[in-house]
Image (cartoon, rainbow, N blue to C red):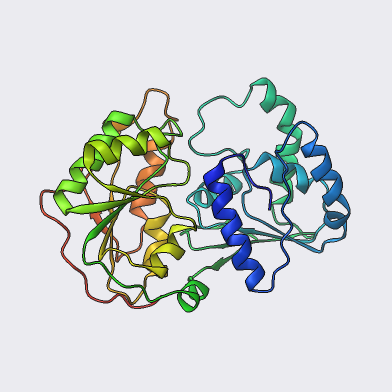
Amino acid sequence: MLPPQDPTTCDQLRGMAELARGEGVTVRWEEARGGAGAPLRTVGGLRAALRRAGRIVIGDPFSRYVQLLLTLTRARDLVVVDDGTATMEFISQLARGERLERWHRRGTGRGARDLVFAPVSANARRMLTPSAARRVEVFSSMPVEPPPGVTVTANDFAWTRARFGPPALTGGTDLVGTSLVETGVVDLDHYLAAVQSLSRAHGATRYFAHRRESTDKLRRIAAEVGLEIVRPDLPLELIARRGPIGRTILSFPSTVVHTLPLALAGTGVRVAVCDVDPAWLTSGASPRAQGFLSGVTGTARDDVHRLPSGGPAAPVAPAGPVAAS
């Protein structure tokens, strides 16, 4: 594990590391960003293992750190494991032969750091493109159309359902937060207004914060909207499965509209997604933002209820049990 500097994400990763150890997996924790000499120590410490490995499994193909480590391997089998919406953009960029770039980034890719890192990024794209010498697989719950040669294996969350739950249901409504404000995509005031509108329309009482949401924003949501803020110590799919969880879960376009229906299959929980109105976008948002977010909503599973931006006047009707995938 190469933890980021964000403390909330690190806490979740530590929790996942303990779960992995409990399943018999050996976990090596590398403070890869812990000071000026950390990158060199990490790369040096992993070089031999990466050279020997026949299979490499990575979690974030957009990470420059991961891309750098890919320059050290001769593995014939590469597997990307990611249930984030970024997987959809990764597959699209790979199919079009484009450089790997996160969907919310705005820029030309010609800054000083981009130019210096360009050869490493190009090598990563080559490594993640199937060839006679290399097999590439994507393990994900996201709906993707892989380019020729890429194998996609669907994650149906069978382990999660077997390991946790079924959860107790509160009978109320929970709202899932997003980091769209923190990434500069959505205006803060528009976001707060949307949270308030959804909460009032559906009687939401709890707000499950995204790990990257700022403390100041969460304070405003608690004070101005009146929601109880919950900071999950594990990914939301595990928290929801462990329970207790609301009978209705509201979300903006995000990973959870694809993953929660699978994790909560058979529990009777209804997941609903609220579109992002184009008026909410900041002037600095990437030109791709609106299309990408619409795609996240549009490709959600059929059992996910769609809400117009801001939420309808009437709450979502309770659902019956959802069949397992």
Residue closest to the far top: 112
Q: Is residue 274 above or below residue 155?
A: above
Q: Is residue 227 above or below residue 181?
A: below
Residue closest to the far left: 313
Q: Nearer the viewer, residue 226 or 305?
A: 226
Q: Nearer the viewer, residue 140 or 240?
A: 240
- What residue sits 66% from the left and 68% below the top? 21
How far from the left and from the top, in percent, is residue 95? Answer: 58, 49
How far from the left and from the top, in percent, is residue 165? Answer: 41, 75
- What residue sits 71% from the left and 38% below the top? 34
Question: Looking at the rendering, in which quadrant would you find the C terminus?
Answer: bottom left
- Residue 181 relative to residue 234: left or right: left
Q: Nearer the viewer, residue 113 or 183?
A: 183
Residue 90 visible (yes or no) = no
- Residue 27 relative to residue 153: left or right: right
- What residue sits 50% from the left and 53% below the top? 84
* The image quarter in which residue 217 lies: top left
Q: Is residue 288 above or below residue 252?
A: above
Residue 268 visible (yes or no) = yes
How far from the left and from the top, in percent, is residue 128? Answer: 69, 51
How far from the left and from the top, in percent, is residue 132? Answer: 78, 60
* The image quarter in which residue 187 lies: top left
* Numbered marks: total: 0
- What residue sits 28% from the left and 68% below the top? 269
